[in-house]
Amino acid sequence: MKTVKDIDIDGKRVFIRCDFNVPKDEFGNITDDRRIRSALQTIRYCIDRDCKIILASHYERPEPGKYEEKYSLKPVAKRLHTLLKIKNELYMANDVVGPDAKEKAAKLEAGDVLMLENLRYEAGETSNDEAFAKELASFADVYINDAFGACHRKHASIYAIAKQFDRDHKAAGFLMAKEVNFFSKVLEEPIRPFVAVVGGSKVSGKLQALTNLLNKVDKVIIGGGMAFTFLKAQGYEIGKSLVEDDLIDEARDIMEKAHSLGVKFYLPVDFVVAPEFSENTAVKYLPSQEIPHDWMGLDTGPASSRLFREVLNDAQTIIWNGPMGVYEMDKFSKGSIMMSHHIAETHATTIVGGGDTADVAQRAGDVDEMTFVSTGGGASLKLIEGIKLPGLEALEK
């Protein structure tokens, strides 16, 4: 995979696809700018080479064709300008491929940066529309994809646009290269013991990744809502807890496969249970065999945390994807926070797979202790599954 270093960009117009889909609070303030900071290296590299830079990103899921202030990238442009510490102005277009964007792009001088509005304001983005991709491509001589977090999507600014540039005029940005190299290196040559910690609410989204990981790891820890599908497959009463009944056979197959491969497979031994999911509900700490039929498990309990710490003790490589409970509510966040602390305390190479998992590590204050925090949850899962990401495929063609 070519990176921005391997191609000639000096003085050229460069289109960089970034992933600025950052969390904001109810007042529209950015609460975590890690994805913006991750893009700085590539942008600065282009500024230093007197490029005219056009940045593009999506933000959440607005209705195409309908401009809503809450989906605008203006706050991101403001934060980026502060972080870049550049003398030049950072221009913000009021549209994506409309007259304002084109006019501002035409006026760019060497070292100037222009950010386009939210790509998803245009219907052509999510439908991977060829004509929309051509319009985006007309802004630049060189295309750089640095949006690892969106690379698993076949969207116009990721996939169709890359066809408009030949191999000498398209490449991966530094963040993209770092993410891909890190994941592939760890998955191909891990230092053992290699432990996978997999959580989150559903087995369905992680089935393929789990199956693939069994061939590579020495131990698997399962947490989050998906644990109940495995517990039900073992015949336990799980009450009103989240379960995917249609995947019970698959869960059984995964446990049997782990057993036949000699991979140690750990499930929670206790839970924080409640009659309903709310902040002021009563809670109990119960062993996993004792969940009342009208209660639900919402977090792993203290005994599970101690067990998991023992399991992680001798790990040399840990890959973590998915929280251990409904961490967004303080009452049910302890299991996820403790897991973050346990992983951070090991001497292992630790990889946190983006999205919610990165959010947990952030809340726990452990981000700096982790070896690598990915910026893409969905994309990192697809890499673990061994699936070719559309964004990478398009760069190689």
Image (cartoon, rainbow, N blue to C red):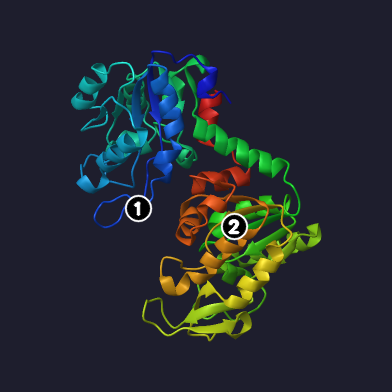
Residue 158 visible at all:
no
- Residue under label 1, please give it: 31
- For mark 1, give the secondary structure: loop
- Residue under label 2, please give it: 344
Q: Position of residue 74 (x, y in %)?
A: 25, 39
Q: Which mark is residue 16?
A: none
For the residues labelled 2 and 1, the Cα–Cα distance comes to 22 Å
97 or 28: nearer the viewer = 28
303 or 71: nearer the viewer = 303
Residue 88 visible at all:
yes
Residue sitting at x 56%, y 35%: 178
Q: Position of residue 20 (x, y in %)?
A: 37, 41
Which amino acid type is shown beneath numbered disc 1? Answer: Thr
147 or 24: nearer the viewer = 24
State whether residue 272 is above or below residue 207.
below
Give the left or right position of residue 145, taking residue 308 as reference. Answer: left
- For mark 2, give the secondary structure: helix
Position of the N terminus by quadrant: top right
Residue sitting at x 48%, y 58%: 365
90 or 196: nearer the viewer = 90
